[in-house]
Amino acid sequence: MKIVVAYSGGLDTSIILTWLKEKYNAEIIAFCADVGQQEELKGLDKKALKTGASRCYRDELREEFARDFIYPMVRANALYEGQYFLGTSIARPLIAKRHVEIARKENADAVAHGATGKGNDQVRFELTFAALAPDLKIIAPWRDWEFKGRTDLINYAKAHGIAVPVTAKKPYSMDRNLLHISFESGILEDPWLEPPADMFKLSVSPEKAPNKPEYVTIDFVQGNAVAVNGKALSPFGVMDVLNKLGGKHGIGRVDLVENRFVGMKSRGVYETPGGAILHFAHRQVETLTMDREVMHLRDGMIPKYSELVYNGFWFAPEREFLQAAVDESQKNVTGTVKLKLYKGNIITAGRKSPVSLYNPDVATMEDDAGAYNQADATGFIRLNGLRLRTRAAVLAKKRGKKK
């Protein structure tokens, strides 16, 4: 039997390589997707081979991640429950897609992942497998093995000589990629507890951010950021630069209690410096360039689109349907935004577009030279108030009868 395992080098997957080899007497292929973990990838290949894998794939996917997953989501202005930038959620379909490709290449019998039976990731991985490779056997150790929690895993790691980046003093879980880093579990399970200051990796605290604001310009073409401060960049390049700028100024920290797909509430702490800037800037270009009714229709899709991403339905027909509508709405979203970054804040300093729908001659509070006839508003308001006046008359009649 041959099993391809999604491997991160963290506590869970470090245990899984050894545990699967023992339980199934199988050949284990480790797969690590480079979606922007940076130093977390150091020595991963050697560690995988040492803990049970016969081979370790380490695939560079950062550009694909930015171009084909982060950017489409930004075009949709997706925020889950109004706060979460979906950093972990959007990485899973890409990782699972590549997971399937490697399983096919290796002629594997099964795929395995380290997601817990309580979390969302198990759903995200397995729905992608269902969409792309329904014939592959799926192994989810957290739903099968004897371990009850992370303390048991730490003890197992010690007994088997497996080095893991978690201790009893720092038992929270971290997940990093190009869009964000997330922290959950352990000491963070108390929603009243403020996260420790030394926990954060991508950003300084707003209090320690520079005392002088920094200006940045971002150019968009059809909803996609293509340049920062006048320099043309690939999607990965844009994210890389904005992450550094946002982190420097304490931008993008989010602490929330969210509703998991499996039914429970969970507390997560996130750093999304570049994503927060990109999301904000994108909306500013839209304010100039999107038709009102198109914008309102697209905005009405945001909760559903975000829910689909969060719940793992990236490769589902309904997400693809919504994406097609979103992308149609972005054809005119071209322009430049100037932002001021200061102590955790993103402040609009200007925006412009060659296809702007904003007309100062009409909007002006000064003499508009006949561009807008204010007297026309009388009939407009009267017609829109007709149903309200009719309703008021009916209510007055009812009150009269009661007397």
Image: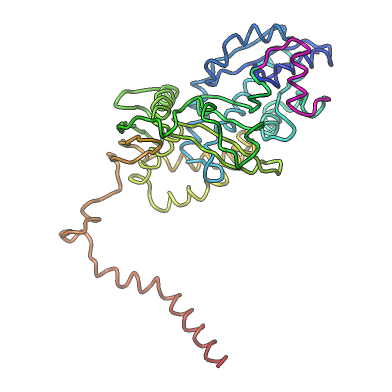
- Give me the residue at 66% from left, 32% from top: 185
- Give me the residue at 44% from left, 32% from top: 205
- Give me the residue at 36% from left, 46% from top: 287
The image position of residue 386, as x and y in percent, is 42, 76
Q: Is residue 316 above or below residue 8?
A: below
Does the magenta segment cover residue 154?
yes
Please give left or right for residue 270 compared with residue 235 in the image. Answer: right
Image quarter (top left, top right, bottom left or bottom right) of the C terminus: bottom right
The image position of residue 16, as x and y in percent, is 74, 18
Report the number of numbered marks.
Answer: 0
The image position of residue 379, as x and y in percent, is 32, 72
The image position of residue 223, as x and y in percent, is 41, 36
Q: Is residue 28 above or below residue 123?
A: above
Does the magenta segment cover residue 208?
no
The answer to whether residue 154 is seen in the rendering is yes
Q: Which residues are magenta?
A: 146-164
Please give left or right for residue 225 compared with residue 258 in the image. Answer: left
